[in-house]
Amino acid sequence: MGEDLRYDLRYEVPFAMSSYRQIDEGQRRESLRPIAVLRLAPEVLAERFTLPFVPGAGHLADTAAALLELTDGRQFMLLRHYDDPSTGTELLASERSETPAEDLRAFLDALDLADHDVTWALASTPSAPSLAR
């Protein structure tokens, strides 16, 4: 009989068994913006969630990033600028989202992170002013 690979951490966990999966840059569907800063360094996130961070190239050589997609289709990027003197990892989500707090909650829930893992969060985008007179 074949091996049951579900419990061997050397193999990627199938999407159906997880609330997120790592994707590559070619699978990103839209522009992303910062919605939060996590207190956890990329090295901690990489080890805890088996997420390889990809080093940037060219003018982004001082960065490392991991792109994730939740089962509901929302995409997030974990990003670290190594020339930034502050600690932690930026969390980016769709720049078109009007509910960054809901996006942040979905991300934290998917990775089983707590509110205390967030050091900064973007406030929800206010409604656009009405142009009707």
Image: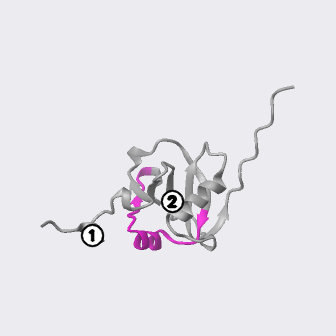
Using a 10 Å C-alpha cutoff, classify the residue at mark 2 as few (fewer than 14 neighbours), some (14 to 19) or many (20 or more).
many
Closest to the observer, 79 or 59: 79
Closest to the observer, 57 or 27: 27
Q: With 61 as the anchor, is 31 left or right in this view?
A: right
Across and down, in percent, residue 93 comes to: 56, 51
Q: Which residue is mark 1?
A: 10
Across and down, in percent, residue 47 comes to: 40, 73
Where residue 79 is drawn, which disc sits there?
Answer: 2
Decide: is 30 above or below 78.
above
The magenta-colored residue range is: 37-58
User: Can you see residue 75?
Assistant: yes
Determine if the magenta segment contains residue 90.
Answer: no
Determine if the magenta segment contains residue 40.
Answer: yes
Q: Amino acid at mark 2?
A: Leu
Decide: is 27 above or below 48.
above
**Quadrant of the drawing holding the C terminus:** top right
Q: Secondary structure at mark 2?
A: strand
Query: Which residue is at a point 42% across and 51% down the rendered structure image?
Result: 58
Query: Which residue is at a point 22% across and 68% down the rendered structure image?
Result: 4
Q: CA distance from mark 2 to mark 1?
A: 24 Å
